[in-house]
Amino acid sequence: MIKGSLSVFIVLVALTCSTAKPDEKPMKKEKMKPQTLSRGWGDQLIWAQTYEEALFWARSRNKPLMIIFHLSDCPHSQALKKAFASDETIQNLADKDFILLNLVFETTDQHLSPDGQYVPRILFVDPSMTVRADIVGRYSNRMYAYEPSDMKLLLSNMQKAKMFVKAEL
Amino acid sequence: MIKGSLSVFIVLVALTCSTAKPDEKPMKKEKMKPQTLSRGWGDQLIWAQTYEEALFWARSRNKPLMIIFHLSDCPHSQALKKAFASDETIQNLADKDFILLNLVFETTDQHLSPDGQYVPRILFVDPSMTVRADIVGRYSNRMYAYEPSDMKLLLSNMQKAKMFVKAEL
């Protein structure tokens, strides 16, 4: 019974940010650092630029795609980014077995927002182009949200996404 | 008559690359430099990441969008990039009056390939979301291709794209 209760979804209270207002375009400084594709989620990882590109790589390399929706001015996104970028196990698994995409702007594919558009939110897409809406976090009202304390769950979900692809071969 | 002949389109002979094979995903090195959004087309400029994002900024800031399609392993793209990045007048105008996007992967919007998918190719989109298929380079068989020697024409086309927006106000 105690173990069973672990699988009960927790309701997330205001730990995500709305995407109604996208990031402000960065203000130009005197000498700007070039913007990176990683945006701080892992400078040593290879990131796709667009959803179309990411889908192409997922299909051609038969790897699951991991999409991180975030906003630079959202404190919950920032906190998750810090945990994600500093977690070596996750970074290594992401590097080895995933096609990676982080987006500050929504795509037109509604399958990528099964329960709404909010950030941070992480979705997996398998190489057959199916959004894995079944791979969820622990919050029943924001099913694809993760907190910094959810890194073990995220790792387990990444393994689930990877196993599914292997099992299909 | 002599002046008139200047407006005659020239046929471009193999000065563009096909996009049939997109860029190879960059190979991981021991210590990789983070990928940049500029990809060398102007590190000091602000670049949109995706077409959707670029359209959003074009509309909300009432600025024309300039899209550069290129490939990192295409020598003609590389040559144009070098000329583009080192042309101060173009860089300043791009910075001040344009929403910028460079893509190594085609979008699903067929309006962005009026005469085919090739690189390098530069298209303008006005803030009302209309692709300016009328703003062309000098090659009749690759109407949106530019060579390093075409920087004056590109500048003039940027001014045309900008003037059209101002005139519409």
Image: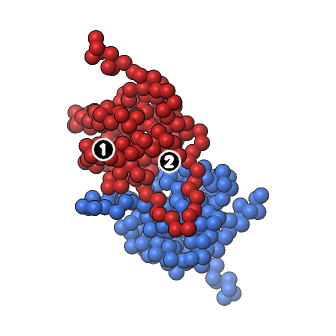
Chain colours: A blue, B red
Q: What is the residue that sits farthest to the top in this orientation?
A: B1
Residue at mark 1: B87
Name the element at disc 1: loop
Residue A168 place in picture, x, y as percent: 76, 59
Mark 2: amino acid: Ser
Q: Which quadrant of the structure image shows residue B127?
A: top left
Residue B46 in view in this figure: no
Mark 1: amino acid: Asp
* Residue A79 as seen in the image, left or right of residue A61: left
Q: Residues within 10 Å of mark 1 (few under 14, many from 20)?
A: some
Residue A53 place in picture, x, y as percent: 55, 50
* Image vertical order of residue A100 relative to residue B106, above or below: below
Q: Earlier in the sequence, mark 2 or mark 1?
A: 2
Residue A147 place in picture, x, y as percent: 50, 76
Q: Residue at x 61, y 63 (%)?
A: A98
Residue at mark 2: B72
